Amino acid sequence: MCLRVSNLRYQTDIRGLIKSRKLFRPGLFLLLFLLPLCLHAQEREKLEEKRKQLLREIEMTSNLLNETQQNRAATLDHFLTLRKQIEKRQQLITTLQTEVQLIDEGIIQAIEISEALRDDLDRLMEEYGMIARAAIRTQINKSATLFVFSAPSINEAFQRWQYIRQYDRYRKKQARLIVETQKMLDERLYWLEEQKKDKENLLESEEMQAQLLADEIRTYDVLLADLKRDEKRLSGELQEKQSAHQKLSAAIERIIREEMARSRRENRNPDALNNPSSEKDEAIVSGAFEQNRGKLPWPVLNGVVTGYYGRQKHPTLENVTVDNNGIDIRTDQGANVRAVFEGEVVGTQYVPGYNYMLIVKHGNYYTVYSNLEEVIVQRGDIVKHKEIVGMVHTDLLTNTASLHFEVWQEKQRMNPLNWVSGK
């Protein structure tokens, strides 16, 4: 009779605990609470990579600025490069601010998770205590065998055995959950402290970048004032540049026109009609070039764009617009020039004001590299992807090196920035 009462008490205690408690599932908890932190961590990684890339670009631009800092003749180049530096610095500050905001959001989430973990830990401890007290009251551990074999029937004995197993598993599970929850809580608290340190470092970096930006803006304003006072010289240089630009465009158009005429003659050749593989190959190359739109590498390893495609206002001369068929990339002195895609060299020529010019054909597309000091390939050569084709010219007067890069689809000019990968 005593064992029967103990059995009833045990069943009531265990059933009450299982039915009344909020079931704790570590996997579900981690999914609901830690998933936002995983997404937060991924976003942080992207921002950190962007910040590092901007810092590398700013360092490169700073080196370019040092080359022209004391050179009066290079004031315009210095001004354009500094403008790009300011743009990158502003992007960096925005990235730092976004990182700080993300950290704040992560800290709030971490605090909420820590509080939830503390609540669950307290509840688990309380429930474990209830289990222990129930075990003491029923003395089920000491009389488990007698408890089972004293059952009036086999079914009752089986039920008692199931209850004992359920009790034992439940008790072990509670102990394991207490350890796991305490571990998760410790990890969250450690992560929280690390985030606070990261936030402090980012805020210090943001403050430093803001000071550098303010100095650069002051320098920019001084340079702009100097350039406006020197409009006569700039106007003369601009006229010379535009004249050279027209000669370059005429040379490019002539070479492309001759190449298109040569392709048509070859395709009309009886041998080509019998074996039209050359026309198919050209279509394949054109398709491959088109598929890499926005993915092409830069023609130089390092550089910043100081002149953009299309018609635009002159950076310092009022009511003056300039046309640019490509982009101008300020780069390191003696920088190597690379083919952005595999193709055939169809022309090289010296153009006053732009030095040596090189054209590479990619099916129906052409890439143009000008202001080269030297060209190391010749007409008819097949160049590979990223193969070095020449070296950028360095202006001895301004101490600057700049590559002019264009993209054409037959006779149509295109914006190179739509073809090369982001930088």
Image (cartoon, helix red, strand yellow):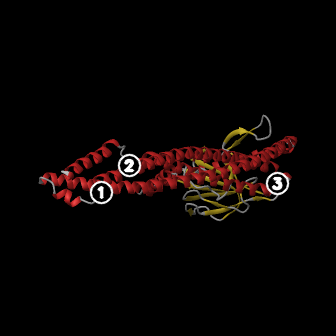
Q: In this rendering, would 12 be left or right of 319?
A: left
Residue appearing at x 70%, y 38% in the figure = 312
Label 3 amino acid?
Answer: Gln
Frontmost of labels 1 and 3 is 1
Of residues 239 and 46, the one drawn nearer to the viewer in this rendering: 46
Q: In this rendering, would 134 be left or right of 383?
A: left
Dot 3 lies on which element?
Answer: loop
Whether residue 240 is visible here, answered yes or no, is: no
Q: In this rendering, would 99 be left or right of 61?
A: left
Q: Do the CB atoms of the residues marked 2 and 3 lie less than 8 Å apart?
A: no
- Counting residues from the start of the chain, the first of labels 2 and 1 encountered is 2
Residue 134 position in % (x across, y down):
32, 51
Q: In this rendering, would 251 be left or right of 17?
A: right
Residue labelled with disc 3: 69
Most extreme residue toward the bottom, as rendered?
Answer: 376
Residue appearing at x 75%, y 58% in the figure = 63
CA separation in Å, label 2 and label 1: 14 Å
Residue 319 position in % (x across, y down):
78, 34
Quadrant of res 242 = top right
Residue labelled with disc 1: 168
Quadrant of res 144 = bottom left
Label 2 amino acid?
Answer: Glu
As displayed, is residue 378 above or below residue 122?
A: below
Residue 3 position in % (x across, y down):
20, 53
Label 1 amino acid?
Answer: Asp
Whether residue 89 is visible here, answered yes or no, is: yes
Residue 337 position in % (x across, y down):
65, 60
Residue labelled with disc 2: 127
Dot 1 lies on which element?
Answer: helix
Of residues 107 and 11, the one drawn nearer to the viewer in this rendering: 11
- Counting residues from the start of the chain, the first of labels 2 and 3 encountered is 3
